[in-house]
Image: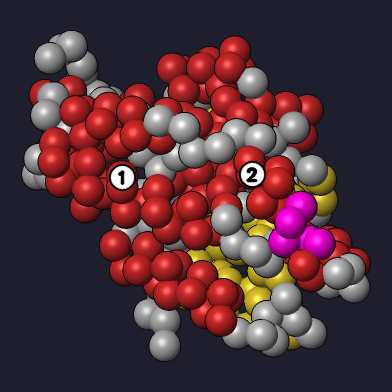
């Protein structure tokens, strides 16, 4: 049913594994479509009580949106991409069933944004988090500018957004970006044990914990501003230079245009 995801349902826990390990599970259009379908399945399948999202392989959770699909996009197409990404991630954030990210490696760009759209995060010791879009002449477009500020505060968020630096799992723990750091071999077990406990609680009450907690932030127009700003980046020379440089495996030389 899915071309880019592996899924399994065991004892009420639905595990979604993004399965492009040779590309560090980068989010291309096919993955985003599959994630949308998977969240629809979560919504309608009464046997699913809770969800784990993780990445295939030992190195990457998700290393970002697929940069090869950025090339040649207009500003308007950039905005469409951000709108679609935000909508899929809103499905995760607003899922009435708990969704936990089991971050097993790099969670960069769209990968960090995906983890942040989940209700909470558990990381393996080798995990790394960051929003490196600025290296590409871009900004996050799948809700990252909003959720990073919500989760770790404005100062830390702006430092990560503007430097493009990565933080390791222990720093992510200290920032409150993840709830636990465990050895990679224990990652899925840890996520499962928390969800097994949640699955014994009243499902309607659990759903309302999620919707009430989400209401603290609301979906203000910061998300719309992000879509517009993300799209505007596609009209710049720097974005073309940044993505070309990544794909040619060289350092970008930005002109400010
Ligand atoms: N989009 C498309 N392809 C990606 C990708 C992305 N976001 N991230 C990694 N890949 C691909 C690489 O191009 C490479 O493909 P290749 O083997 O065909 O050349 C493969 O995944 C493995 O990545 P590689 O860069 O060789 O691994 P590494 O261990 O040297 O570096 C990272 C790992 C995560 C530091 C590096 O891949 C990276 O910087 N990725 C981009 C991160 C990013 O900018 N994300 C935000 C996008 S908006």
Residue 127 at what x, y percent from top left?
A: 65, 45
Q: Is residue 35 left or right of residue 228?
A: right
- The magenta region covers 205-209
Tell me the distance, in whole angstroms, between the alpha carbons under discs 1 and 2: 20 Å
For residue 232, side relative to residue 50 (left or right): left
* For residue 216, side relative to residue 240 (left or right): right
> Is label 1 in contact with label 2 (beta carbons under 8 Å)?
no
Where residue 71 appears, as percent x and y from the top left, is: 15, 45
- Dominant SS type (magenta): helix
244 or 142, nearer to the observer = 142
Q: What residue is shown at x 31% (from left), y 47% (from top)?
A: 83
- The residue carrying pointer 1 sits among few (fewer than 14), some (14 to 19) or many (20 or more) residues within 10 Å by Cα, namely many
Quarter of the image that includes the N terminus = bottom left
Residue 74 occupies quadrant: top left
The image position of residue 213, as x and y in percent, is 71, 43
Residue that badge 1 annotates: 82
> In the picture, which quadrant includes the C terminus?
top left
Q: Is residue 245 visible?
A: no
Instruction: Residue at 78% x, 28% y: name it.
Output: 174
In magenta segment, residue 238 = no
Q: Which residue is mark 2?
A: 214
Q: Quadrant of residue 254?
A: top left
* Helix, strand or loop at mark 1: helix
Which label's residue is closer to the chain start, 1 or 2? 1
**What is the tally of numbered marks visible in this picture?**
2
């Amino acid at each position: 049913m899915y071309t880019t995801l592996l899924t399994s349902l065991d004892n009420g826990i639905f595990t979604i594994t993004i399965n492009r390990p040779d590309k560090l599970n980068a989010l291309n259009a096919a993955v985003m479509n599959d994630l949308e379908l998977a969240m629809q399945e979560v919504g309608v399948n009464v046997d699913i009580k809770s969800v784990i999202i993780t990445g295939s392989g030992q190195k990457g959770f998700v290393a970002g949106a697929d940069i090869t699909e950025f090339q040649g996009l207009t500003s308007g197409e950039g905005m469409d991409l951000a709108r679609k990404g935000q909508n899929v991630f809103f499905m995760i954030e607003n899922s009435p069933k708990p969704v936990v990210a089991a971050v097993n490696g790099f969670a960069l760009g769209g990968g960090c944004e995906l983890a942040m759209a989940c209700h909470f995060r558990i990381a393996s010791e080798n995990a790394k988090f960051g929003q490196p879009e600025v290296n590409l002449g871009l900004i996050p477009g799948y809700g990252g500018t909003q959720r990073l500020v919500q989760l770790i505060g404005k100062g830390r968020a702006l430092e990560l957004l503007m430097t493009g630096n990565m933080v390791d799992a222990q720093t992510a723990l200290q920032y409150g970006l993840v709830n636990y750091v465990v050895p990679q071999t224990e990652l899925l077990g840890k996520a499962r044990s928390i969800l097994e406990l949640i699955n014994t609680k009243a499902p309607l009450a659990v759903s309302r914990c999620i919707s009430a907690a989400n209401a603290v932030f609301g979906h203000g127009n910061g998300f719309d501003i992000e879509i517009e700003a993300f799209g505007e980046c596609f009209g710049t020379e720097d974005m073309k230079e940044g993505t070309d440089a990544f794909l040619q495996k060289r350092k970008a030389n930005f002109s400010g245009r």
